[in-house]
Image: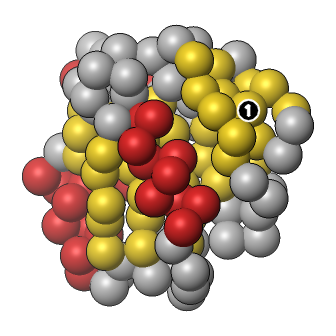
Amino acid sequence: MPIEETAFGSITIDGAPYPHDVVIRLSGEIVKRKKNLSKKYYGNSHTISKDEAKFVFEKGCEILVLGTGHHGLARLSPEAQDYFEKKGCAVVAEPTPEALRVFNELKGRKIGLFHVTC
């Protein structure tokens, strides 16, 4: 399942366009990101909360590829970063266009969270 491209506000995965942020599960399932889990704490979706980290994480994942947006504004909160570390899940955070390449090239048990705006 390749991630083909991203444009501001969308991402195309396996030929299907998604006009919103997405989470890619270990199984390859694509789900809409639950931004409200972070917005309730920070007022925006640029800082990923521990609650959202819990939604994104899956037992058995080895790495999270975080697409931080086209301008690289999204990031993990310190609590979310600690959560992934305690679960033994490494995090690679890159601007979304670069994160697509990283996700496609990585082998192993990976999940993805891709912010498609800012």
- Evaluate whether residue 41 shows in this view: no
Residue sitting nearer the eye, 62 or 49: 62
Which residue occupies 23% across, 76% down? 85
Position of the N terminus, as image quadrant, is bottom right
Left or right, residue 24 beside residue 102: right
Under mark 1, the amino acid is Thr
Q: Residues within 10 Å of mark 1 (few under 14, many from 20)?
A: some
- Evaluate whether residue 35 shows in this view: yes
Percent of width and height locating residue 114: 50, 39
Which residue occupies 86% across, 33% down? 16
Percent of width and height locating residue 36: 48, 26
Left or right, residue 38 beside residue 34: left
State which quadrant residue 19 falls in: top right
Left or right, residue 71 beside residue 19: left
Percent of width and height locating residue 5: 64, 33
Question: Residue beneath label 1, please?
Answer: 12
Residue placed furthest toward the right: 15
Which residue occupies 43% across, 36% down? 96
Which residue occupies 67% across, 71% down? 26
Position of the C terminus, as image quadrant, is top left
